[in-house]
Image (cartoon, rainbow, N blue to C red):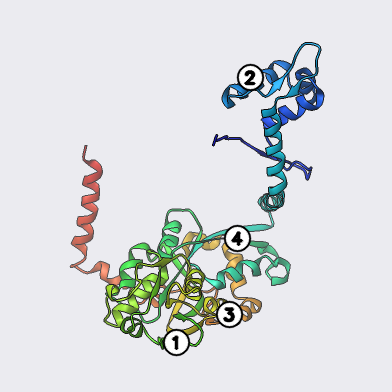
């Protein structure tokens, strides 16, 4: 099959042809006008340009496109007509999607030129409440936001918790969402994963919600799975989350607390990209259980066995707190409308929503004093010296 690469331009208006392609425009003009010169005039181009483009396309495609003889009308070859047919067929089949894309692009660019709209880009671990928040923010005038804060559009990209914080640190977003199990202290996996990514004085933790993680199992829980120990003992098939996701960190933490090894969990290497994907895998019979949230289990018609509570945090750089978009978001998170809505999501409750919190209090494994101890000082200096020497080495 011949591979043809064509470049299209989205039409500015809602004309029947939503996508425009230079080659198809050339063929259409020459065919309708009956001559290359007439086609050139219709397109507002020179005869030399149109003739040259037709020759270039014929060489590239390896087929003649137009037949013209002195004193005769120019007409398309069979191959040229087939190209036109393929174009019309593709446009007809894709027109609903193309129209939706054009409308979305128009809306997005309209927001870019509207000084009253603030766009906040947020990378976050998958969360049903954040999806609900995005739709809630689109209600705009119904949110009782301060007049000076303007309207808010949340550009949310769901990714793993670790990747979300890295995206924040690399400047790819202005806010990140991640979650940690309640009660995880020092010398835990949670500390080892998140502590290197967050810096006191640089990052600010913002409250969002408390939610429950648990086992998602088929209706009736026929295998009587009430804990991870039950999953291991009954050799139930398990669905895990991808590396870097907050739920996978939570699972490893729960396994450690239960004295279990990852290798003991059947299906530990079977990964799914979201809570919903895990729930669907269970519902489809591909596995017997998976760790997730109650909302995802309910949506898939599954039973939910609570295992542990966790806090879902938002984090931004301290310097971003003064940005209008962040200020509007923090206000929105504290409105009665939003607090009432989040409490209706199964397994969720508002927790210091929209309030800037102490990192040391929220993440108890953070101890600012330990960086000042004699034991840790040489290690930090040594690391800095190593980095400096590496940079200076020819």
Total numbered badges shown on the rendered structure: 4
The residue at which mark 4 appears reads as 324
* Residue 345: image tag: 3
Q: Which is closer to the viewer, label 3 or label 1?
A: 1
Q: CA distance from mark 1 to mark 2?
A: 70 Å
Q: Position of residue 72 (x, y in %)?
A: 80, 15
**Of the image marks 1 and 4, the number of the one nearer the N terminus:** 1
Rendered position, 99 above or below 367: above
**Residue underneath mark 1:** 222
For disc 2, the marked residue is: 55
- Of labels 4 and 2, the one closer to you: 2
Foreground disc of the pair 1, 2: 1
First in residue order: circle 3 vs circle 1: 1
Q: Could you tell me which secondary element the residue under label 4 belongs to?
A: helix
* Residue 105 makes an appearance in the image: yes
Q: Nearer the viewer, residue 337 or 189?
A: 189
Q: Kindly state the secondary structure of the residue where label 1 is placed.
A: loop
Mark nearer the N terminus (3 vs 4): 4
Q: Is residue 39 above or below residue 89?
A: above
Callout 2 secondary element: helix
Within-10-Å neighbours for mark 4: few <14, some 14–19, many 20+ = some
Give the Cα separation between the discs numbered 1 and 4: 52 Å
Q: Nearer the viewer, residue 201 or 182?
A: 182
- Which of the two discs, 2 and 3, labels the residue nearer the N terminus? 2
* Distance CA(mark 3)–CA(mark 1): 26 Å
* Residues tagged 4 and 2 counted as in contact (Cβ below 8 A): no
């Amino acid at each position: 099959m011949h591979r043809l690469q064509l470049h299209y331009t989205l039409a500015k208006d809602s004309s029947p042809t939503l996508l425009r392609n230079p080659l198809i425009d050339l063929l259409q003009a020459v065919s309708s006008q009956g001559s290359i010169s007439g086609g050139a005039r219709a397109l507002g181009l020179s005869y030399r340009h149109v003739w040259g483009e037709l020759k270039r396309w014929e060489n590239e495609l390896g087929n003649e496109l137009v037949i013209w003889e002195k004193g005769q009308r120019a007409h398309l070859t069979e191959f040229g007509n087939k190209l036109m047919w393929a174009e019309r067929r593709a446009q007809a089949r894709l027109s609903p999607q193309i129209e939706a894309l054009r409308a979305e692009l128009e809306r997005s660019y309209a927001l870019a030129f509207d000084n009253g709209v603030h766009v906040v880009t947020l990378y976050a671990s998958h969360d049903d409440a954040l999806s609900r928040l995005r739709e809630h923010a689109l209600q705009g005038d119904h949110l009782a936001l301060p007049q000076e804060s303007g309207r808010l559009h949340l550009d949310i990209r769901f990714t793993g918790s670790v990747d979300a914080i890295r995206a924040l640190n690399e400047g790819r977003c202005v806010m990140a969402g991640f979650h940690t199990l309640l009660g995880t202290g020092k010398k835990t996996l949670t500390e080892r994963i998140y502590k290197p990514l967050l810096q006191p004085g640089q990052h600010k933790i913002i409250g969002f919600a408390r939610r429950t993680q648990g086992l998602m199992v088929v209706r009736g829980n026929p295998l009587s799975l009430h804990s991870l120990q039950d999953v291991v003992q009954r050799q139930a098939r398990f669905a895990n989350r991808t590396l870097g996701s907050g739920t996978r960190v939570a699972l490893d933490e729960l396994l450690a607390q239960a004295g279990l090894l990852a290798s003991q969990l059947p299906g530990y290497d079977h990964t799914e990209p979201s809570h919903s994907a895990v729930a669907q895998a269970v519902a489809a019979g591909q596995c017997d259980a998976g760790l997730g949230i109650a909302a995802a289990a309910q949506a898939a018609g599954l039973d939910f066995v609570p295992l542990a509570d966790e806090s879902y945090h938002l984090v931004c750089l301290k310097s971003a707190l003064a940005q209008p978009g962040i200020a509007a978001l923090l206000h929105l998170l504290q409105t009665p409308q939003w607090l009432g809505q989040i409490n209706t999501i199964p397994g969720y409750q508002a927790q210091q929503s929209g309030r800037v919190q102490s990192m040391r209090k929220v993440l108890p494994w953070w101890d600012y004093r330990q960086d000042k101890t004699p034991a840790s000082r040489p290690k930090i200096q040594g690391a800095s010296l190593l980095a400096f020497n590496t940079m200076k080495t020819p």
